[in-house]
Image: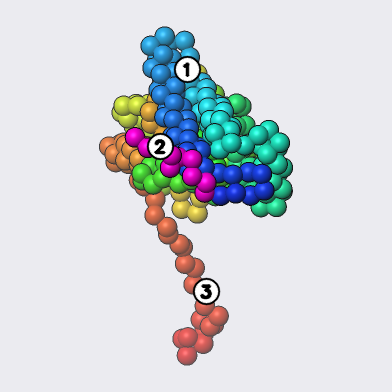
Amino acid sequence: MDMSWLDQELIKVGNFSLLVGELLSFFVVIIVTFVLSRVLRAAFQRLAMRQGVIAHTSAYVIGRIIHYIVLFIGFIIALTALGMEMTELALIASALGVGIGLGLQGMVNNFVSGLVLLLEKTVKVGDFVELSNDLVGEVMAIYMRATLIRTNDNVDILIPNAELVSGLVTNWTLAEKVRRFRISFSVAYGSDKELVKQAVLEAADNVPYTLSSVGREPTVWMTGFGDSSLNFTLGVWVQPEQVKRPTALVSDYLWAIDDALRKYGIEIPFPQRDIHIRSTVDIKDCAE
């Protein structure tokens, strides 16, 4: 088979010439690099799960670092396959430095921020986070440029890594997976406060994912006097799997509280106003 076509020259710039074979070698190395990275990460994940000595989040971090290292080495080998020497690679590195300084600093910032997130583990895959713009969701993946967050409505949102490093992020599950929720409710003036407390604690016990261990028992606080009501708050610790569904959780507790208040005949208030009418007409004038 005649393979002379591989030696055909495509581009010649000064002393550098690009052959067809070298270009094919470049793409083959790039493809092999991505395949090798995927195989190594999958093998490491299986090994970590089988041995059980590395946590899921740590395995994810190590897998991403392996991915970046393999890509870097593969890219250098691919450039070498093009026939480039070290001096030419140094020129490319200098050009990249100029490009970063002019227009790629945002991308590099996001990449470095992604490494910070992976190494610090302040935001990990599986965490449930809340951002300063009130976005709430679960971290699904941390990529080179952005972090994938999935909301409870199954909406996937990509957040630049730099925003997670420099912005305000509330991590609901950083240290512990359990969390206390505060459920506000009101009753009418004149209601028996002890009976209200009994009814609401009973309602909390009826919700199946309520925790009642020592130090994490449900609690009822009286929080103020409203225009037409006595205001209370139920503080309740819940199981880890419920932390990631706050809207449904609040609905479940409000539903149970309403049923309990109706059971004990405790009135739920509604807005009302007392109207006082003053007359400026003298009674004698009215008699005439």
Crowding around mark 3 (Cα neighbors within 10 Å: few <14, some 14 to 19, many 20+) is: few
Vertical relation: 65 (above or below) 113: above
Q: Earlier in the sequence, mark 3 or mark 2?
A: 2
Q: Amino acid at mark 2?
A: Met
Asked whether residue 62 is in view, the answer is yes
Which element is circle 2 on?
loop
Residue 221 coordinates in the image, percent (x, y): 50, 34
Q: Give the residue at x 71% y 48%.
A: 98
**View extreme (bottom): residue:** 288
- Dividing the picture into quadrants, the one containing residue 201 is top left
Q: Amino acid at mark 1?
A: Ala
Which sits in the foreground, 42 or 37?
37
The circle on residue 3 is 2
User: Can you identify the residue that label 1 sits on?
Assistant: 55
Which sits in the foreground, 195 or 211?
211
Residue 100 coordinates in the image, percent (x, y): 68, 46
Residue 189 coordinates in the image, percent (x, y): 44, 47
Which element is circle 3 on?
loop
Asked whether residue 199 is in view, the answer is no
Asked if marks 2 and 1 touch (Cβ < 8 Å), the reply is: no
Q: Which residues are magenta?
A: 1-10
Q: Nearer the viewer, mark 3 or mark 2?
A: 2
User: Can you identify the residue that label 3 sits on?
Assistant: 278
Q: CA distance from mark 1 to mark 3?
A: 74 Å
Q: Earlier in the sequence, mark 2 or mark 1?
A: 2
Q: Is residue 8 magenta?
A: yes
Q: Earlier in the sequence, mark 1 or mark 3?
A: 1
Which element is circle 1 on?
loop
Q: CA distance from mark 2 to mark 1?
A: 51 Å
Q: CA distance from mark 3 to mark 2?
A: 108 Å
Quadrant of the drawing holding the N terminus: top left
